[in-house]
Image (cartoon, helix red, strand yellow):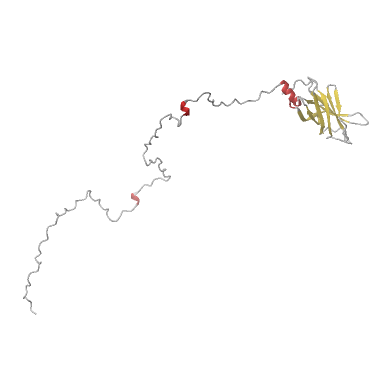
């Protein structure tokens, strides 16, 4: 944001208070006050009686800015009745932040005449033309506008004949999906995982020999069975005892 063109513009300065001031009194509490100096303009706050090291003021002053002078001198004094006032500390306030942002709330450090730390003074600065200067001397880029979304053109003339026909003509012949030639059922491609245990090796020497001899393996092929007799079987031979012959004894048998 630009900070050019501050000539004649107004700057508001509010003296809030001081913290951790150097104490110039040995017996009683000191009575501080603050002086502001910008070019030939000087302002003084009221005296904070018995303010000690942390006085409070809450007073506002207005300065006319001068082009090329962008700092303010601040001096803190201790008010005395019977003698000259005691110098506590002084510092410089820079305007870069307030001129660019329009607001600055900062505690500025104070130093003695020998350059030692003498406390701090809190000031609130307000500059109302910060946004106007940014707009006048450093305009921002134009806002981004999204390009228009292309739309389908409307028919300006009579649509072609195929657009009015229903059902619409087939654009391409449809084909049946190709038949998969993979075998069914599908071949398993996952093999069982190898066993985590080592394979067992059979050791025949570790067992005792059987007490009986091992059977010999049979010959192969086995011998053929005896041939079956011709069919039909031959008629049975007549038994010499059938039918029974005449009784060999006395017939009729005696009673």
Quarter of the rendering containing residue 107: top right
Residue at x-position 33% and y-position 50%: 205
Instruction: Count all numbered tags in the image, as a single digit.
Output: 0
Q: Position of residue 9 (x, y in %)?
A: 79, 23
Please name whichever residue, 190 or 66, is drawn nearer the observer in this view of the structure. 66
Q: Is residue 63 visible?
A: yes
Asked if 185 appears above or below 223 in the picture, the reply is above
Q: Is residue 116 visible?
A: no
Horizontal side of residue 127 vs 159, given as left or right: right
Quarter of the rendering containing residue 174: top left
Horizontal side of residue 236 vs 44, given as left or right: left
Q: Position of residue 130 (x, y in %)?
A: 75, 25
Quadrant assignment for the C terminus: bottom left
Please name whichever residue, 8 or 173, is drawn nearer the observer in this view of the structure. 173
Q: Residue furthest right?
A: 82
Q: Residue furthest bottom?
A: 255
Residue at x-position 81% and y-position 28%: 13
Please name whichever residue, 77 or 151, is drawn nearer the observer in this view of the structure. 151
Residue at x-position 82% and y-position 25%: 63
Residue at x-position 76% and y-position 29%: 103
Q: Position of residue 231 (x, y in %)?
A: 14, 54
Q: Position of residue 251 (x, y in %)?
A: 6, 75
Quadrant assignment for the N terminus: top right
Asked if 222 appears above or below 133 in the picture, the reply is below
């Amino acid at each position: 944001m630009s900070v050019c063109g501050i000539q004649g513009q107004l700057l508001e300065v509010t003296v809030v208070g001081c913290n951790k001031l150097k104490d110039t009194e040995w017996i009683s509490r000191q009575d501080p006050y603050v002086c502001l100096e910008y070019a030939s303009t000087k302002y003084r706050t009221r005296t904070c009686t018995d303010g000690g090291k942390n006085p409070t003021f809450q007073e506002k002053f207005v300065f006319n800015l001068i082009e090329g002078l962008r700092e303010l001198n601040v001096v803190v004094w201790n008010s005395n009745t019977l003698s000259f006032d005691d110098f506590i500390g002084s510092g410089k306030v820079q305007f870069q932040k307030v001129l660019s942002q329009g607001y600055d709330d900062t505690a500025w450090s104070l130093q003695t005449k020998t350059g030692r730390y003498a406390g701090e003074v809190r000031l609130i600065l307000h500059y109302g033309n910060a946004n106007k200067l940014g707009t006048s001397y450093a305009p921002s880029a134009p806002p981004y506008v999204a390009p228009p979304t292309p739309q389908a053109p409307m028919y300006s003339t009579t649509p072609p004949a195929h657009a009015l026909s229903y059902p619409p003509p087939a654009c391409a012949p449809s084909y049946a999906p190709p038949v998969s030639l993979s075998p069914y059922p599908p071949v398993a491609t996952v093999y069982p995982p190898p066993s985590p245990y080592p394979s067992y090796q059979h050791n025949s020497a570790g067992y005792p020999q059987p007490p009986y001899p091992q059977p010999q393996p049979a010959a192969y092929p086995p011998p053929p069975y005896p041939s079956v007799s011709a069919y039909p079987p031959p008629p049975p031979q007549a038994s010499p005892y059938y039918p029974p012959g005449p009784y060999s004894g006395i017939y009729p048998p005696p009673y």
